[in-house]
Amino acid sequence: MNDSNSDIVEIFEKGKTQTIQTNVDNVPVFITPEGMEIHSLENLVDSRAEKPKRLEQHITLLSSESFIEYYNKFSTTDSAIFVDQQQGDFVAILDYHADHDTPAWCKHVARYRCPKTKEFSTWVLNSNNKMGQEDFALFIEENSRNIAEPNAAEMLEIASSLKAKKDVDFKSSIRLDNGETQFEYVESIGANAGANGQLSIPEKIKINTRAFQGGDTYELEARFRYRILQQGLQMWYTIITPHLVIEDAVTQVVDEVKENINEGSVFISEAPL
């Protein structure tokens, strides 16, 4: 190796041990010798600054009133609220893009999820849930306060009858002129057949319940379903179009938000986050 090459190698080896200091957007950056890794002091600089460079916040509000109040406190003309009508989910991005050429960080976000009532959730979640006749009777008893038609007393009587008819053989069913379904059964007494009997249940029930906490009361319609099995009746109900109730309840909150925000836009969409 000649002297020129030796000098180059020596300079290169010395360079490998040097720490390089520079600035990126006024933030000190150091490149250290081992592995020539880059280390930024941005966090240290930010921690010693009088205030952050930009606002970053994700917060979930628990009422529409608090959501609106928070939004109005921090919103600008570019702020945007996105509403998922199926989920009742409101997402406000306070630092949203002004236009195609003016992107923003979208780091300041407020959220409000419309809280469904326990009663509404119970009825909807159990829709199409097949139950034995005793379990079905217990369900009716526990939730009879929400049933508007037939009246609570009639529904409790039906529930009591279902619980009492555990040891019967259901043979057939017919639909009556009044819309009820009448079951024919034979009581089982040991190994012998006992007396015949009948049990009637309504074809439909109407349920009154609030969809969202603090919101309006809605009427849900449900159809009774059943299957005659060897071990007894299998029973369930089907809620008719519960999604329309949610959409209407969310629309009321959307109207409330639109009427009370000071600036920005409201969009109906899937929740962006």
Image (cartoon, rainbow, N blue to C red):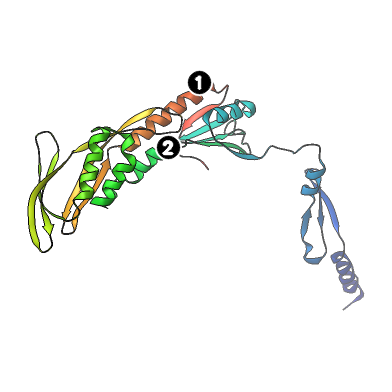
Q: Position of residue 189 (x, y in %)?
A: 12, 59
259 vs 215, nearest the viewer: 215
Amino acid of disc 2 = Thr
Rate crowding at label 1 as few (under 14), some (14 to 19) or many (20 or more) other CA atoms within 10 Å. Answer: few
> Mark 2 highlights which residue?
117
Residue depicted at 52% across the width and 30% down the height: 64
3 is higher (above) or lower (below) than 166: below
User: CA–CA distance between discs 2 and 1?
Assistant: 24 Å
Residue depicted at 83% across the width and 50% down the height: 22
Q: On the rendered structure, is 207 left or right of 170?
A: right
Residue depicted at 15% across the width and 59% down the height: 230
Task: For residue 130, say whether it is visible.
Answer: no
> Mark 1 highlights which residue?
259
Amino acid of disc 1 = Glu
160 is higher (above) or lower (below) than 66: below
Q: Position of residue 9 (x, y in %)?
A: 86, 71
Rate crowding at label 2 as few (under 14), some (14 to 19) or many (20 or more) other CA atoms within 10 Å. Answer: some
Residue depicted at 80% across the width and 50% down the height: 41
96 vs 129, nearest the viewer: 129
Name the image quarter holding residue 231. bottom left
Q: Position of residue 265 (x, y in %)?
A: 53, 27
108 is higher (above) or lower (below) than 167: above
Name the image quarter holding residue 221. top left
